[in-house]
């Protein structure tokens, strides 16, 4: 795997963690949106699927 591909995966994970934190914060601050753990778990599953797709494409 090239350095550029590793950098892209690293940035994808970083941005995904930032969005995951935002989802947790929003659901904690405004509970009417959803329960925090279910929303965070759903976004975490999307992040894992995206990373697996990037790694499988190499």
Image (cartoon, rainbow, N blue to C red):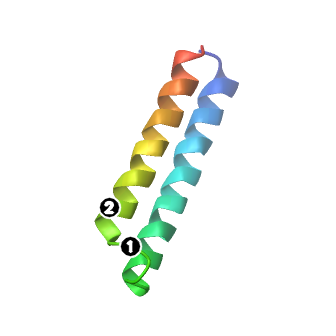
Across and down, in percent, residue 13 comes to 52, 44
Q: Decide: marks 1, 2 in contact (CB < 8 A)? A: yes
Estimate how packed mark 1 is, as few (under 14), some (14 to 19) or many (20 or more) residues with alpha carbons within 10 Å.
Answer: some
| In this rendering, position of residue 24 left or right of residue 58 | left
Residue in the image at 59% along x and 28% along y: 6
Say what secondary structure mark 2 lies in. helix
Across and down, in percent, residue 47 comes to 48, 43
Residue in the image at 54% along x and 25% along y: 53
Question: Is the C terminus in the top left, top right, bottom left or bottom right quadrant?
Answer: top right
Q: In the rendered structure, find residue 38 and report the number of the disc placed on it.
A: 2
Across and down, in percent, residue 2 comes to 65, 17
Compared to 50, does 32 lie above or below? below
Q: In the rendered structure, find residue 46 and report the number of the disc placed on it.
A: none
- Out of 18 and 46, give the one closest to the viewer: 46
Compared to 21, does 54 lie above or below? above
Compared to 36, does 2 lie above or below? above
Q: Residue furthest right?
A: 4
Say what secondary structure mark 1 lies in. loop
Estimate how packed mark 2 is, as few (under 14), some (14 to 19) or many (20 or more) residues with alpha carbons within 10 Å.
Answer: few
Residue in the image at 47% along x and 68% along y: 23
Residue that badge 1 annotates: 34
| In this rendering, position of residue 38 left or right of residue 55 | left
Across and down, in percent, residue 3 comes to 65, 23
Question: Is the N terminus in the top left, top right, bottom left or bottom right quadrant?
Answer: top right
């Amino acid at each position: 795997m090239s350095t550029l591909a590793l950098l892209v995966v690293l940035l994808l994970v970083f941005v995904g963690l930032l969005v995951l934190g935002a989802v947790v914060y929003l659901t904690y601050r405004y509970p009417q949106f959803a329960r925090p753990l279910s929303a965070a778990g759903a976004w975490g599953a999307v992040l894992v699927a995206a990373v697996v797709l990037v790694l499988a494409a190499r």
